[in-house]
């Protein structure tokens, strides 16, 4: 049983826009939800059992409402006992960490050519998002496992233009066209989190905390 309390954006990065101050964050703030989903889907749901902790206040409040309603029902019907709620499950490990890096323009470049007023060009830019994840023992507080994963984010664009004079230089024709593709930052964060969960599983196997049947580290 594992629990996830927080998985924060620790990059401090804001979205970059020309000419305006944008206070929107550059990466998603839904890290906890992505980590829980990655844990619950690992091994088709067979690897981890996840205890609810991010919404623990709502869970405890709802259990208090149920307990109070059952007590009132028992009193109204002169019952000495009423069905109590099962105790909450406790976690043996806590999964912690966060999005610790979002580096832009790690690599950029382009290529272009022009002849007889006709030109084409291509540009690309590469960003990187970095995720850190660790597993902490609830009994001892020891950090049992710790991994960091990275995912590149590729952006590229291509375009063409025509610049020509016609009718003895008295009229100008200028045409431009282009297209760009930007990989989703949110998808990149999710991929990095899933890779971190997978690496935690492999690291836990290599250190003897659990065993993966049929796993060969040399493959």
Image (tube, rainbow, N blue to C red):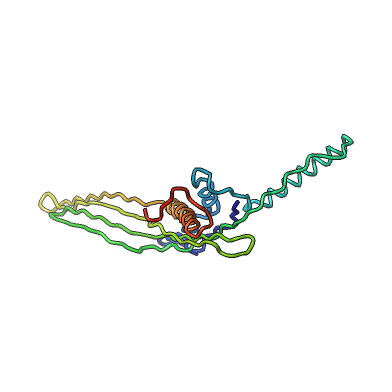
The answer to which image quadrant residue 72 occupies is: top right
The answer to which image quadrant residue 138 occupies is: bottom right
Give the residue displayed 53% in from the left and 49% down from the top: 39
Q: Is residue 92 visible?
A: yes
Nearest to the observer: residue 62 or residue 48: 48
The answer to which image quadrant residue 137 occupies is: bottom right
Q: Position of residue 59 (x, y in %)?
A: 68, 48
Outermost residue toward the top in this view: 77
Q: Is residue 172 left or right of residue 84?
A: left
Residue 46 sits above or below residue 146 on the image:
above
Q: Is residue 76 left or right of residue 63?
A: right
Give the residue displayed 53% in from the left and 44% down from the top: 46
Nearest to the observer: residue 123 or residue 49: 49
Residue 12 sits above or below residue 64 on the image:
below
Q: Position of residue 100 (x, y in %)?
A: 48, 63
Q: Is residue 147 left or right of residue 79?
A: left
Q: Is residue 27 visible?
A: no
Q: Is residue 128 left or right of residue 169?
A: right
Residue 67 sits above or below residue 194 on the image:
above
Q: Position of residue 211 (x, y in %)?
A: 50, 52
Nearest to the observer: residue 137 or residue 55: 137
């Amino acid at each position: 049983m594992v629990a996830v309390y927080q998985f924060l954006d620790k990059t401090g990065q804001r979205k970059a826009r020309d000419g305006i101050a944008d206070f929107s964050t550059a990466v998603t703030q839904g890290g906890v939800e992505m980590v829980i989903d990655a844990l619950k889907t690992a091994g088709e749901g067979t690897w981890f059992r996840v205890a609810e902790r991010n919404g623990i206040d709502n869970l405890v409040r709802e259990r208090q409402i149920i307990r109070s309603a059952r007590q009132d029902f028992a009193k109204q019907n002169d019952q000495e006992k009423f069905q109590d709620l099962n105790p909450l499950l406790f976690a043996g490990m806590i999964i912690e960490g966060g999005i610790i890096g979002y580096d832009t323009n790690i690599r950029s470049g382009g290529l272009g050519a022009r002849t007889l007023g006709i030109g084409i060009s291509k540009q690309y830019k590469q960003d990187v998002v970095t995720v850190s994840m660790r597993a902490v023992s609830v009994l001892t507080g020891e950090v049992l496992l710790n991994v960091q994963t990275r995912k590149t984010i590729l952006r590229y664009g291509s375009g063409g233009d025509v610049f020509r004079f016609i009718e003895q230089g008295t009229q100008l024709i200028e045409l431009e066209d282009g297209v760009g593709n930007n990989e989703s930052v949110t998808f990149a964060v999710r991929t990095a989190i899933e890779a971190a969960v997978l690496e935690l599983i492999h690291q836990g196997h290599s250190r003897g905390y659990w065993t993966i049947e049929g796993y060969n580290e040399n493959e």
